Image (cartoon, rainbow, N blue to C red):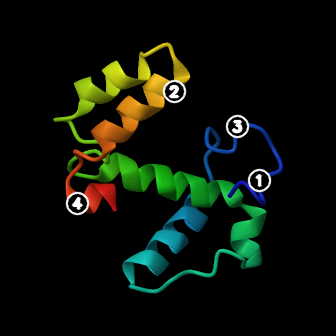
Amino acid sequence: VEQHGVVDGIYRLSGVSSNIQRLRQEFDGDRCPDLQRDIYLQDIHCVSSLCKAYFRELPNPLLTYQLYDKFADAVAIQMEEARLVKIKEVLKELPVPHYR
């Protein structure tokens, strides 16, 4: 996405709905879509839109409800080095599928 997105705000803009659905169908069909196809390169926003939809539709967020407060506390640390150490500690608490 970032290699082919030529505008700022690539993750804020929506892709063409039909392209998003086509891409979703390719993933749902257990195929690995070729994201280098012209249709996706010309509408790179459909790739970022589908990615956002995937994370939005997860039953439990990637960073989990249970660890939300710990992540919030970690990112609030002012010292960058200490903040990164704390974030890494909290990441290690994620369930295995989420961590992977």
Above/below status of 72 relative to 33: above
The amino acid sitting under disc 3 is Gly
Tag 1, which secondary structure? Answer: loop
Query: CA–CA distance between discs 1 and 3?
Result: 9 Å
Q: Decide which of 19, 67 is in the foreground and name it.
A: 67
Q: Which mark is residue 9?
A: 3
Q: Residue at x 46, y 70 (%)?
A: 24
Query: CA–CA distance between discs 2 and 3?
Result: 28 Å
The amino acid sitting under disc 1 is Gly
Query: CA–CA distance between discs 1 and 4?
Result: 32 Å
Query: CA–CA distance between discs 2 and 4?
Result: 25 Å
Above/below status of 48 relative to 40: above
The amino acid sitting under disc 4 is Val
**Residue 95 visible in this rendered orientation of the protein:** yes
Q: Decide which of 9, 73 is in the foreground and name it.
A: 73
Query: CA–CA distance between discs 2 and 1?
Result: 31 Å
Q: Which residue is mark 4?
A: 96
Quarter holding residue 74: top left
Mark before the other along the chain sequence, 2 or 3: 3
Q: Which residue is mark 1?
A: 5
| Label 4 Cα neighbours within 10 Å, binned few <14 / some 14-19 / many ≥20 | few
